[in-house]
Amino acid sequence: MAPTTSSTIPLPYTLFFLYIEPFFTALGAVYAFFLQHQYLTLTVSSNPLPPSLREQVVLNQLANLYLVFAVSEACVLRATKDVRVWKIFLIGLLIADFGHLASVFAVEGWEGYWKIWEWNSMSWGNLGFVYAGATMRVAFLAGWGLGGGSKRKGSQSKR
């Protein structure tokens, strides 16, 4: 078996991935499951109709996916300090970030991605928070703040 790469995960990553992101993702699940009309109206304000049965089923499924995302992130990343496990898990979430950003294109269009002064609370969740999560994931995957770069064999000069 390969040796584990275990270390202390820096506080900003710990706070974001173990607490902040799971909390807000679970909040998205609450909105998608219990506040469906508000969720849809905030997502597509031009169609203020109550959700149809079909939309209710899809929103319930979305809520379940948000919940499994939040619980998986909070539990899996709490279970280990192995940076390799964190990186593998975060690669999957980064792929999901890009899928999530693509999914709002039909409503937001290209301009919606950067006109933050026009965002409502749902846009801040669908875009702003996803930008923050993707940025944190890219930073972690790039090794920013993780250290370990100076501990290579032979890197110390012998005098």
Image: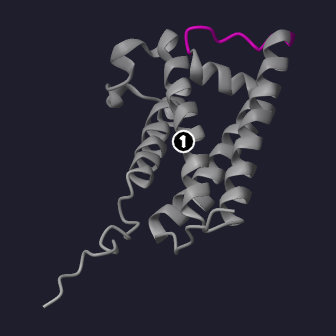
Query: 56 above or below 123?
Result: above
Q: How many marks?
A: 1
Residue at the far bottom in the pictured view: 159
Which residue does the image show at 43% across and 38% down from the upper left? 131
- Assign a secondary structure to mark 1: helix
Q: Is residue 115 left or right of residue 92?
A: left
Q: Position of residue 68 (x, y in %)?
A: 77, 42
Q: Quadrant of the N terminus?
A: bottom right
Residue closer to the observer: 52 or 21:
21
Residue 46 on the magenta segment = yes
The residue under label 1 is 91
Q: In the rendered image, which quarter is residue 67 located in? A: top right
How is the rendered protein coloured? one colour
Q: Position of residue 146 (x, y in %)?
A: 41, 66
Which stretch did the figure color magenta?
45-53
Q: Position of residue 32 (x, y in %)?
A: 73, 31
Name the dominant secondary structure of the magenta segment. loop
Which residue does the image show at 52% across and 31% down from the upper left? 126
